[in-house]
Image (tube, coloured by chain):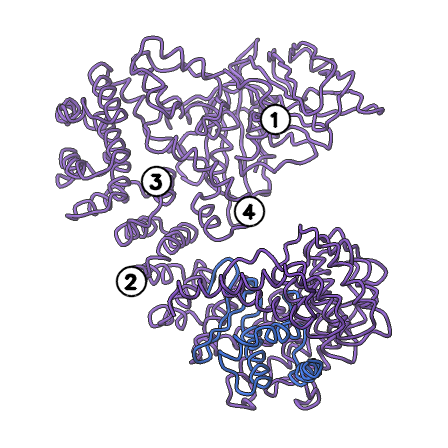
Amino acid sequence: KSKEAEIKRINKELANIRSKFKGDKALDGYSKKKYVCKLLFIFLLGHDIDFGHMEAVNLLSSNRYTEKQIGYLFISVLVNSNSELIRLINNAIKNDLASRNPTFMGLALHCIANVGSREMAEAFAGEIPKILVAGDTMDSAKQSAALCLLRLYRTSPHLVPTGDWASRVVHLLNDQHLGVVTAATSLITTLAQKNPEEFKTSVSLAVSRLSRIVTSASTDLQDYTYYFVPAPWLSVKLLRLLQCYPPPGEEIRPAVRGRLTECLETILNKAQEPPKSKKVQHSNAKNAVLFEAISLIIHHDSEPNLLVRACNQLGQFLQHRETNLRYLALESMCALASSEFSHEAVKTHIETVIAALKTERDVSVRQRAVDLLYAMCDRSNAQQIVAEMLSYLETADYSIREEIVLKVAILAEKYAVDYTWYVDTILNLIRIAGDYVSEEVWYRVIQIVINRDDVQGYAAKTVFESLQAPACHENLVKVGGYILGEFGNLIAGDPRSSPLVQFNLLHSKFHLCSVPTRALLLSTYIKFVNLFPEVKPTIQDVLRSDSQLRNADAELQQRAVEYLRLSTVASTDILATVLEEMPPFPERESSILAKLKKKKGPGTVMGLEEGKRERGPDINGGPEPAPASATSTPSPSADLLGLGAVPPAPAGPPPSSGGLLVDVFSDSPSAVAPLAPGSEDNFARQGPCLPPTPDPGPVSIPCSEQNLGPPVQCKVTLPWFVCKNNGVLFENQLLQIGLKSEFRQNLGRMFIFYGNKTSTQFLNFTPTLICSDDLQTHLSLQTKPVDPTVDGGAQVQQVVNIECVSDFTEAPVLNIQFRYGGTFQNVSVKLPITLNKFFQPTEMASQDFFQRWKQLSSPQQEVQNIFKAKHPMDTEITKAKIIGFGSALLEEVDPNPANFVGAGIIHTRTTQIGCLLRLEPNLQAQMYRLTLRTSKETVSQRLCALLSEQF
Amino acid sequence: QFRNFKIIYRRYAGLYFCICVDVNDNNLAYLEAIHNFVEVLNEYFHNVCELDLVFNFYKVYTVVDEMFLAGEIRETSQTKVLKQLLMLQSLE
């Protein structure tokens, strides 16, 4: 029959039914049922039904089972909840619930459970628990009532308050009828996830129930034995319920714990027994219980013995001929790998997993194998695993390539001991699967190369070699262009990679690349102009050519014009400053990791948000040549972000480079006319200028972008501010205080933002700055009073001008008083104005440093402190902290490269105090030794105390 | 076999039985739940075939309601389910 014929037939039938329903004669129950049933059938065939509802509702009040049943079925399948019939339906259901006829009750309950609408929840949320716990209810009705309640709870939890029936429901776990227990377990599991406290007595009941099941002979449970496995579904459900709770306490309930451990052991033992049946149903049911038991063991994560046994069992499954089992074993092992007790045990199966990667026919199984390798990876096997993943990547399915690329990139970074290996790995990654290498991955490799000077030469050499391949991926060109632009000089000594050869190699790829890559290459060229004066004419020729200067793309054209001009106008000094090496990137959570999270979990919206924010800086700071000023500003993390938290404007390079500098801060090229006169003004204004006050942004942004600092918290975070100028100083339910500050020489300015977090006005709002008499002679603070009312949700700003008269140790106190509602509030916090804020960094060579170091050798001038590390000892973080502290970080001064050396001058109105510092980490002992030498004893002491708190 | 939830399916000759569960639910348990369900159908209709299911769709709904309710397993004992079904059939 053709489609048309079917539609025709159906329309005819519909017309017939319609006329019957409309007809004058009242239909008898049987024909009403017949036609409603036909309508239902037509609906299930996929046609719309827009009538017949009323007839179906009429059927509900019939006393014949079949009529009632069709009526309920029609309603379950077809009735939308907003229909006005709902009142009639609910009425019919109410009657049936009260009818004491178990069949009718069953139909009514099933209807509620299938529809589960809000209206039904409102109508029956009180009734159903009563049915559930009443002594005289039939077992089958109890089962249905339990699941009915569960359904209503899921649709409208607030309408189903757990009442006094809760404890009686828990006792259903002891019911004779296993069907009732099954249904009740589902209900309790869901309820316990929301209110574990109210249902915690279910733990011991569930354990004893489980124990009775697993120890029973296979015939004991008769009806509930499925292919010789006693009550598999109930066992699974009980194990799942137990996963809502921590393991039963050793001290409080040793008996329960012992019994549970026994159960789990029995289940594991049974897996070793020969199967009681060859049927797949038997082994599936048995293994269903086993896998659930293993996930409970993993959830508890407290019995090393069980964990290792579980792992061994899964190891056997890895080679099982059932694909399903291999899949599930890999999946469970992933979870086991993250437990400290079983991580080693999982690692013993590495060869099998790798074999699975190579030989497995099913994609989804291979995908699990990749996941497991990722999970079991640690320092000891990283090289092997990464190598295997790379070789798998060549043949991997397209759908999972990007994920594998991300995983390889993360593992390579996380476990890299030897960074040349890391560089090789990533370049391989680009070679094998260039299309799947996302921006995050290649940004990251550049960040790492820039931050680690020991691999820079190697990286330059390797990318140079890779670029020689006749066809290479655009991503490789990007990495190559960037790295050679920064570090091409390190390999220029070799005639085979002389500057001109490097340039020609890159330029040979230029025409094949997309616009963003070309833009990056142009930046590389201008960097070459600085690195290798000998290729300057060649590059100028390229820049001057029509294909650049008159390029249809505005960005490329602008770059070509600006760079060409820059290379002609600027002196070598200026070029060197403008085009200096990129400063190290501040450490933060790898953006790749964020990306992987995003790919993985739909639930991690927060993570995604952060990921986006973190990518911002990579793009800003990424392919652009950074202005020299970035290297010497006190807080590199803030200015790379370009989010307004720009530190005091440094004495910028001469005007001719102004256009270029602005370029970095503005994303759209059209925003700034190239080399427009007065563009340096623009830059200067961008420096100290702050976002408009009502913007709630400035307070919250600085704290979310830093992984050094704690998240928003309610107590004072003074030490945190020693190396930071911006952030949240204080926060409670009512009030948030944010700070932005900038310091130059002996002067500073602090913006204090008071945010009212409530919806009510604050009255008599008076912040006061309190300095002790002693402090007043050293530090002068000036501010204006703020408006005494702060509206709900509003933010007010206060500016404090600061001058350091002479060195000081104390911090001023900010006291805030206001009325909120009827009550008087009083908050006092220390303001993070510390001596080190008046640091100006000084760069100096090794020789100078040690000469001055010796000059400051009198015992009062030196202060030394040896202390234990409070934070993980990470080189990059430490560097960022020292720079944040305000001193210059001097590289290649100390003969021991692990040590950190810094220098700077503290400016006060009266004097200037030179400071030298040296920090020696001891990784084994997790200790630091910090030595400070300054020309003034009190300064040495104070700085040493401040800085010691930071590590 | 996957989406935001996961779909567990089993094929019996020309018929696919699918069940959609949360990602962290127990795969094998639901795989066997399908089989349990099919065995009941088979018993109830005496060698079930596609046409049985199409013409007796309302009975199939009853079987489903007996065994699965509100997205959970209600009853797993084949004997109990069949007894109830036969009782209901006698009412027709």
Q: Nearer the viewer, mark 1 or mark 2?
A: 2
Report the Cα–Cα distance between label 1 and label 3: 39 Å
The chain under label 1 reads: A
Residue indicated by mark 4: A926
Mark sitting earlier along the chain (4/3): 3
Label 2 residue SS: loop
Q: Colour of chain B?
A: blue
Q: Nearer the viewer, mark 1 or mark 3?
A: 3
Q: Quadrant of residue A467?
A: top left
Report the Cα–Cα distance between label 1 and label 2: 62 Å
Asked if both marks, 4 and 2, belong to the same chain, the answer given is: yes
Mark sitting earlier along the chain (1/2): 2
Of the numbered discs in the image, which one, if any, rests on residue A446?
3
Amino acid carrying mark 3 in the image:
Ile
The chain assigned the colour purple in the figure is A
Which percent across, then down, holds residue A795?
Answer: 65, 21
Q: Nearer the viewer, mark 2 or mark 3?
A: 2
Label 4 residue SS: loop
Report the Cα–Cα distance between label 4 and label 3: 29 Å
Of the numbered discs in the image, which one, if any, rests on residue A941?
1
Which percent across, then down, holds residue A103?
Answer: 75, 75
Which percent across, then down, holds residue A498?
Answer: 15, 36
The chain under label 3 reads: A
Mark sitting earlier along the chain (1/3): 3
Residue indicated by mark 2: A395
Report the Cα–Cα distance between label 4 and label 2: 45 Å
Identified at 13% across, 41% down, the residue is: A496
Mark sitting earlier along the chain (4/2): 2
The chain under label 2 reads: A
